[in-house]
Amino acid sequence: MFKKVLIANRGEIALRVIRACKEMGVKTVAIYSTADKDSLHVRFADEAVCIGPAQSSQSYLSIPSIISAAEITNADAIHPGYGFLSENADFSKICQDYKIKFIGPTPEMIQAMGDKITAKSYMKKAGVPTVPGSDGLLKSLSDTYKIAAKVKYPVILKATAGGGGRGMRIVNNDEEMEKAWTDAKMEAAACFGNDELYLEKFVVEPRHVEIQVMGDGKGRVVHFSERDCSIQRRHQKLVEETPSPVMTDKLRKKMGDAAIAGAKIINYEGAGTFEFLVDKFGDFYFMEMNTRIQVEHPISEEVTDFDLIKEQIRIAAGLPLSTESRFPARYSIECRINAEDPRHGFRPSPGKITNLHFPGGRGVRVDTHVYSGYTIPANYDSMIAKLIITASNREEGLNRMKRALQEFVIEGIKTTIPFHIKLMDDPIFRSGKFNTSFLETYDFSEI
């Protein structure tokens, strides 16, 4: 087992990893920017190193600074969390070069699954269903018109290096194609430094359902069932739940087997997530693989009674997988509490928290790094907490979530709590009969 793990991240995920390490008897090192000097992950780690100013490019994305922090503290492993450098193949490779274990997949695995075209080709070899579309990158606008005619509208243009909804455009006919092509390429170049696109059939009324996997890098892979992430705005997830309201035992087996086959074909090591679109007929299609732990991993932990972060660390240390595939025994739902104003287009709301009260009671978990008096910096992602509810069934879970949200007090800033409270009473949401476009026509004015 490792003697000391450096956490190359911030906020609640850094604190989550610190807790897991401490329970395993492993020393921890926090890194932080000047904007995060008062964050809880800095306080609770065994050691902490300031690695630069508030700008991510000069701190949490600075590989030389992070490697230097690991060397001066004698850390023998680095946990990247999610976001920042967690899916950066170069960072994984540099860790290898410096004999520091990257708690995650190898550079080759990250590279293979990080490029959407390469990932799709691997999935086809593994027999995983993929969305019909271009066989590779789009070479020209004229080729794109031809492929769209073959696939049939509506189609979606996607950046091969993309994520988070960036570099994506839905196209309904030939007349919309040229502008969508230009806009997607410009956005992809600005966000990822790579303007290459590919095309897929746009799946109408899809649900976003993902499968959590864990591989030991020696050919063995298990899964931890599904998470439904269909409640999202502009491709950003707001609510996740498991089991999915549309899941059946037959569909779960098919999707779980597909995810395991996809992970095995690259001999995957560590935690990963296969993201699928499920159409209204129950057919599913591979969308992408995230080669890291997910924001929403706690709901899988709650329904399977298993610590995914500890397992990540065990596997990275060379230990075998400690479990078989697991299936949900209960229901769990997570609401992302963001420092945003939902009444005004989810506008970011950084600032000082003047008063804070966390909800409690049976089946209530709060993963957060904030406290009363904490100032939320404007430099990073606006998520400040995750409220996770566990119950015996979905109806009980939604009722418990509403009760917990009503107890959750955050003053001094705007948050997404009022939106979530309204959502818990929404008849369509409660029915479970919604898809990824549900919030596109949602009335946010009455929140």
Image (spheres, grey):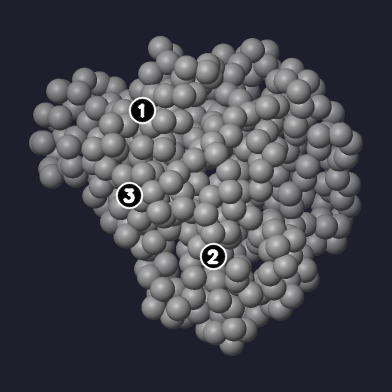
Do the residues bearing badges 3 and 1 touch, measured as CB atoms within 8 Å?
Answer: no
Residue 266: mark? 3
Going from N to C along the chain, the mark reached first, 1 or 2, is 1
Estimate how packed mark 2 is, as few (under 14), some (14 to 19) or many (20 or more) residues with alpha carbons within 10 Å.
Answer: some
Residue 236 pos. (x, y %): 53, 40
Give residue 317's position: percent from left, percent from top.
54, 65
Residue 22, by quadrant, is bottom right
Please, what is the three-letter code of the amino acid marked with disc 3? Ile
Residue at image x 38%, y 44%?
263
Q: Is residue 244 left or right of residue 276?
A: right
Q: Quadrant of residue 445?
A: top right
Looking at the image, which residue is at 28% across and 56% down? Answer: 194
Instruction: Out of 329 and 191, give the one closest to the viewer.
Output: 329
Mark 3 / mark 2, whichever is N-terminal = 3
Q: Residue at x 70, y 27 (%)?
A: 330
CA neighbours of label 3 inside 10 A, class few (<14), some (14 to 19), many (20+)? some
Q: Nearer the viewer, residue 172 or 390?
A: 390
Foreground: 445 or 302?
Answer: 302
Instruction: Tell me which label, 3 or 1, sits earlier in the chain.
Output: 3
Residue carrying label 2? 317
Q: From the viewer's perspective, is 8 left or right of 278?
A: right
Q: What amino acid type is highlighted by mark number 2? A: Ala
Quadrant holding the N terminus: bottom right
- Of 63 and 210, nearer the camera is 210
Depth check, mark 1 against mark 2: the one in front is 2
Question: Which residue is labeled 1 in the image?
Answer: 285
Disc 3 from disc 2: Cα separation: 20 Å
Residue 227 shows in the view:
no
Q: Position of residue 61 (x, y in %)?
A: 49, 69
